[in-house]
């Protein structure tokens, strides 16, 4: 990871801007992970969440896969303050770079809201190849006609949340193909209409998004945004 990008997570910047570290969204994300795995008849025995944050996606997944092994990695020292809880007692959490520290192979590696933060996602995805059977990747689809015209939403997620890459569905899937990944399944998550703790403006704009989505979901997402993408992928032989 580029030193300038990494600095944001090694110091207090990210925690100050995101004091809850997206804990409230974790059960929702875990449900989306479970749904796409179930629909493709995959029952993992081991998960590794790279960029695990507070680790609550892993604890939420335990209700679906109680016998599985759970491991998480994150580079941000501040995130450790969320790890001292009984919920995480049976989850192995590691502070540091996954590629440098890990020596295990997992049924599923989770990259949930990670690739948009990584300076070189192509290199990152290539280096992960030896360590998993499947990847489940969650992409925020920041790019839309409205976000480009306004620009302020893109600048906000860049400054506050640390997104340095912006995706549409097509760009996200093309990135995976460029890295030798075969997309097994993908779906929109309905984030702007279903994610917990939506902002008032997001809820208010939800009516207009529904109208555009009913007309044509792909075109609606590219025009008015408000979606995220969850992808199940594996590396081509």
Image: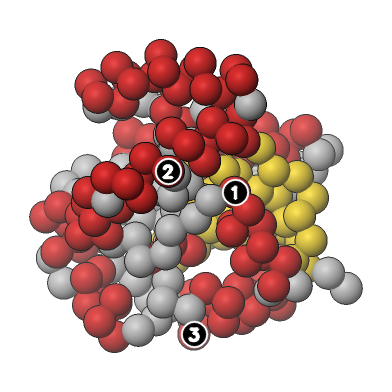
- Which residue is at a point 78% across and 33% down the rendered structure image? 39
When the figure is inspected, residue 161 is found, relative to residue 13, above or below; the finding is: above
Most distant residue in the front direction: 149
Residue labelled with disc 3 = 100
Of helix, strand and loop, which one carries label 3? helix
Separation of marks 3 and 2 at Cα, in angstroms:
39 Å
Q: Position of residue 198 (x, y in %)?
A: 31, 26
Q: Earlier in the sequence, mark 2 or mark 1?
A: 2
Callout 2 crowding tier (Cα within 10 Å): few <14, some 14–19, many ≥20: some
The structure residue drawn at horizontal position 75% and vertical position 45%, both measured from the top left corner, is 185
Q: State the count of labels.
A: 3
Q: In this view, does 237 lie to the left or right of 20?
A: right
Pinpoint residue 213: horizontal percent, then vertical percent: 56, 23
Q: Viewer-nearest of labels 2 and 1?
A: 2
The residue shown at (61%, 81%) is 127
Whether residue 45 appears in this view of the structure is: no
Q: Name the residue under label 2.
A: 145
Residue under label 1: 169
> Foreground mark, 3 or 1?
1
User: What colour scheme does the image use?
Assistant: secondary structure
* Secondary structure type for disc 2: helix
Sort mark 3 into few (<14), some (14-19) or many (20+) by Cα contacts within 10 Å. Answer: few
Q: Residues within 10 Å of mark 1 (few under 14, many from 20)?
A: many
**99 with respect to 75 (left or right):** right
Q: Residue 67, image x and y in percent?
A: 66, 42
| Callout 1 secondary element | helix
Q: Nearer the viewer, residue 208 or 204?
A: 208
Classify 207 as above or below 124.
above
- Relative depth, front residue between 153 and 100: 153
Image quadrant in which the N terminus is located:
bottom left
């Amino acid at each position: 990871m580029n030193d300038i990008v990494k600095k944001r997570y090694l110091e207090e910047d990210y925690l100050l801007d995101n004091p809850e570290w997206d804990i409230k969204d974790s059960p929702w994300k875990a449900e989306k992970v479970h749904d796409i795995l179930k629909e493709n008849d995959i029952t993992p025995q081991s998960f590794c969440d790279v960029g695990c944050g507070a680790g609550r996606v892993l604890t939420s997944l335990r209700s679906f896969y109680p016998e599985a092994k759970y491991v998480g990695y994150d580079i941000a020292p501040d995130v450790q303050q969320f790890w001292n809880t009984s919920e995480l007692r049976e989850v192995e959490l590691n502070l540091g770079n996954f590629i440098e520290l890990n020596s295990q192979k997992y049924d599923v590696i989770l990259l949930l809201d990670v690739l948009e933060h990584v300076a070189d996602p192509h290199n990152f995805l290539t280096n992960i190849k030896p360590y998993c059977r499947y990847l489940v990747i969650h992409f925020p689809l920041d790019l839309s006609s409205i976000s480009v015209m306004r620009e302020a939403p893109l600048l906000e997620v860049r400054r506050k949340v640390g997104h340095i890459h912006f995706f549409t569905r097509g760009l996200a899937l093309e990135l995976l193909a460029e890295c030798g990944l075969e997309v097994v399944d993908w779906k929109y998550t309905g984030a702007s209409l279903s994610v917990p703790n939506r902002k008032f403006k997001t809820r208010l704009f939800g009516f207009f998004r529904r109208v555009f989505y009913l007309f044509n979901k792909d075109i609606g997402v590219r025009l008015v945004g408000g979606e995220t993408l969850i992808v199940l992928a594996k590396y081509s032989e």
